[in-house]
Image (cartoon, rainbow, N blue to C red):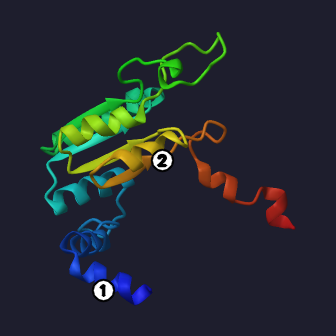
Amino acid sequence: MIQQVVTAIAADPFARQALAVALTLPRQEDGALRTRVAETIAFCQAMGFSTIGVAFCSMFSREAHVLCDLLAAQGLHVVPVNCKVGRVSLSDFGIDTPCERRESACNPVTQAAIMNAQHTDLNIILGLCVGHDVLFARHTTSPMTTLVVKDRALRHQPLDALRPTPTEAQA
């Protein structure tokens, strides 16, 4: 099975280019490490992408604005789409909710549909909820990468849940 996958990748120009570009991304020309944001911008440029979608959670609106400005400053056309797009309620999706939860529902499928209609070259996920990111990934037709994952308990640092606590490290 592995050899079949390797053969398929070798025959796919996009996959070969993405793998080759990814090898060059971690370090800048001077050897310094790049941030993930800088790697993502360098990836877009090296791949020849021009239209970039940003699927973001409304909780990260400020960060999405900064990211979109950074991408635009590099000459990229940005299609930002907030998770609350369309201002639909959960009941519109056939999901019953308690009276106190009447706010607009997140709408990751529509986020993907808007980006598909705009023919984005790459979509960036910025803080979508677990499950919403899955739906977005399932419905987007463009390649995608995740820049930020949401983890409310750990201030958006999910790796902290996988690291030993100081007492566990001493044991």
Q: Which quadrant of the view contains residue 64? A: top left
Residue named by callout 2: 134
Q: In this orientation, which residue lies closer to the viewer: 34 or 64?
A: 64
Examine the rendered structure and indicate whether residue 105 appears above or below residue 146.
Answer: above
Residue 140 on image: x %, y %: 32, 47
Q: Residue at x 31, y 58 (%)?
A: 39
User: Is residue 122 shown left or right of residue 75?
Assistant: right
Q: Residue furthest right?
A: 171
How would you rate the neighbour count of disc 2 (Cα within 10 Å): few for under 14, some for 14-19, many for 20 or more?
A: few
Percent coordinates x, y for residue 82 in the rendering: 36, 28
Within the image, what quadrant is residue 168 found in?
bottom right
**Can you tell which mark lies on residue 7?**
1
Q: Nearer the viewer, residue 155 or 78?
A: 78
Residue 133's disc is none
Residue type, mark 2 in image: Val
* Marks 2 and 1 in Cβ contact (< 8 Å): no
Give the structural element (helix, strand or loop) at label 2.
helix
